[in-house]
Image (cartoon, grey):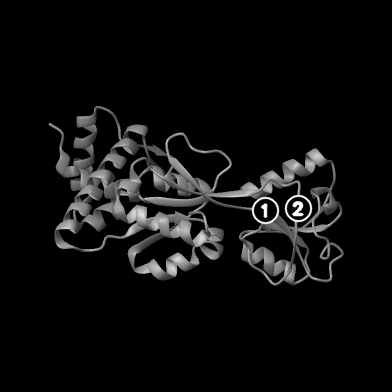
Amino acid sequence: MFPGESLPAFLVFAERLNFTAAARDLHISQPALHVKVRKLAEAVGCPLYVRQGKRLVLTSEGEALARFARERADQLDQFLAELTGEQRRVALAAGQGAYLYLLGDVIARESARLRLFTASRAQTLALVRDGRAQLGISVLDELPDDLDAVKLTTYDQVLVVPHGHPLARREQIRLSDLAGLRMVLPLPSQPLRVTLERLRLVADFEWEVAVEAGGWQLMLHFVELGVGAAVVNGCVRTDLATVPIVDLPPVPYYAIHRPGAPADRRVAQLLAQIRQSLGST
């Protein structure tokens, strides 16, 4: 018989991936939690987690069971909220740039109804996939097969420089115009940096890496200090000079959710508000 009463405990473990922390959150002993997880594994017929070095990692079966447990908990919460008339929060995942430059108005209005995750693109997709976030906002180069993606808006990529810079008065430039410039670049692991380096190699020119920085705000700060020029998404607001780069691909932002999520009125309302705020309705 499937021990469904152990699902809530397994869900806490799946989110923590630490028996000590999960048992503390559940106010039970570690041995008791081990028993619950073991009984679930026996019912499923395969391990739910494995140890990789010092870390515990869910197996694919464990991830599937965690999604099922999260969906079941969400359905129960929704049912109880409808009975009591309480307003449930929507979990929203997005990156730093989206929060700073796209979502501020919506969050200011709806903060009491939101649970926010600050996440990278990969983390945002993972949070939506496993149900911890009902909605994600991110730049996507490729649309995921298992999630629904709604395009919200698109921005050109621009060069940001001080107003006295030789390129500041140009109406537009090409990527090759950055040859020889001192550049404030994203960290090597970030998607924009990967794209810029690939296109630079294709165009066959060099630039000087003045500094690598994580996040638009720090990059703009270095530009203001005269460290170098930076390439950012056109949504970034700044008093510095911005010049469109015509041969860089535009940056599309998408709302991402699991199939059927808009059937939840809260998710549908939040998505509609975001689209209206960005002029994409």
Q: Is residue 199 left or right of residue 147?
A: right
Question: Can residue 186 be seen in the rendering of this structure?
Answer: yes
Q: Residue at x 53, y 61 (%)?
A: 102
Q: How many marks?
A: 2
Q: Nearer the viewer, residue 241 or 91?
A: 241
Query: Can residue 189 be seen from the camera position used here?
Result: no
Residue lying furthest top:
45
Q: Secondary structure at mark 1?
A: loop
Identify the image quadrant of the N terminus: top left
Q: Residues within 10 Å of mark 1 (few under 14, many from 20)?
A: some
Q: Which residue is mark 1?
A: 156
The percent coordinates of residue 77 (x first, y second) are: 21, 54
- Kindly check if marks 1 and 2 are in contact, taking CB atoms under 8 A apart as contact: yes
Residue 142 screen position, x and y as percent: 56, 38
Badge 2 marks a residue whose secondary structure is loop
Q: What is the x, y in percent for residue 172?
A: 79, 56
Please state the horizontal and vertical placement of residue 85, each as a whole percent of the image: 18, 63
- At x 62% / y 59%, what residue is drawn? 214
Give the residue type at disc 1: Asp
Residue of label 2: 245
Q: From the viewer's perspective, is residue 101 above or below residue 190?
A: below
Q: Is residue 14 left or right of residue 120?
A: left
Q: Residues within 10 Å of mark 2 (few under 14, many from 20)?
A: many
The three-letter code of the residue at mark 2 reads Ile
